[in-house]
Amino acid sequence: MVETTIEPLDKLIGGLRVSPAQHLHGAFVDAGVTGAFGVRVREEQFLTMVGLRVTAGSPDRARLAKILGAELPGGCGEVATGHDVVVLWLSPDEYLVISQSVAGSTLVSYLRAGVSEGGAAVVDLSANRTTLRLEGPSAQAVLEKGCPLDLHPRSFATGTAVVTNIGRVPVILWKVEADSYRILPRASFADFLGRWLVDAMAEFKVLGSG
């Protein structure tokens, strides 16, 4: 009798996992521009994202802050940094918790364990969005082609994250560093927005080669 080796289910799923913009990797590389007009885009795959809703004044907010290692952001655009997580303000009672190192199921378990029954909603949204990283001296100019926000540093400071549109796609736009942005579209819009960014970058490839 021939013995059959059965791989663990999580290993099989992990081997088949495909990110929403993975098929655009080559296009992203080709679109990259170096030099004074430099700009590049890439997908940051499989970041953990957990949706959190808790009312203002709730005692659960203090418990969640202790678990996260940071007070929940208090206003539009604010981002809090905690223990291996960042917390983005989405509305007065809604937040997005992001981690590059903590698994979604683990983070959800920790957060749910710290709140009273019915006191807060904690949902793993990791498969709901992806993250596109746009960087370089021309990154702001690329975004200005399709984003209605005033992106000048005096209005959109480093460390700010807001809900907006890029190329008519609803996104969370997070300015991580001076010339570096994380763009969080829903997974179903990743292809459209990725191609839009590649097209918007084409002008700077011509300028860079001139």
Image (cartoon, rainbow, N blue to C red):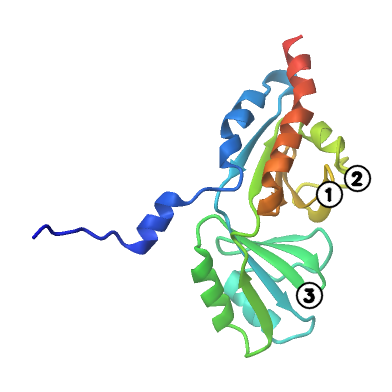
For residue 203, what is the image quadrant? top right
N-terminal of the two: label 3 or label 2? 3
Q: Position of residue 65 (x, y in %)?
A: 65, 74
* Residue 193 appears in the picture as rendered: yes
Query: Residue 15 at x, y = what percent?
Result: 40, 50
Task: State whether residue 192 is above or below residue 202.
Answer: below
Identify the residue position indicated by label 2 in the image: 148
Q: CA distance from mark 3 to mark 2?
A: 25 Å
Query: Image quadrant of residue 142?
Result: top right
Q: Identify the element where label 1 is drawn.
A: strand
Residue 2 position (above or below residue 201)? below
Of 190 and 175, the residue lying toward us: 190
Whether residue 62 sits left or right of residue 149 in the image: it is left
Residue at 65% over, 55% down: 129
Residue ID at (88%, 40%): 152
Question: Which residue is under mark 1?
Answer: 165
Towards the viewer: 168 or 90 = 168
Q: Nearer the viewer, mark 1 or mark 3?
A: 1
Q: Could you give the CA–CA distance between mark 1 and mark 2, rounded to whole angstroms? A: 7 Å
User: Which residue corresponds to mark 3?
Assistant: 93
Q: Residue at x 63, y 81 (%)?
A: 63
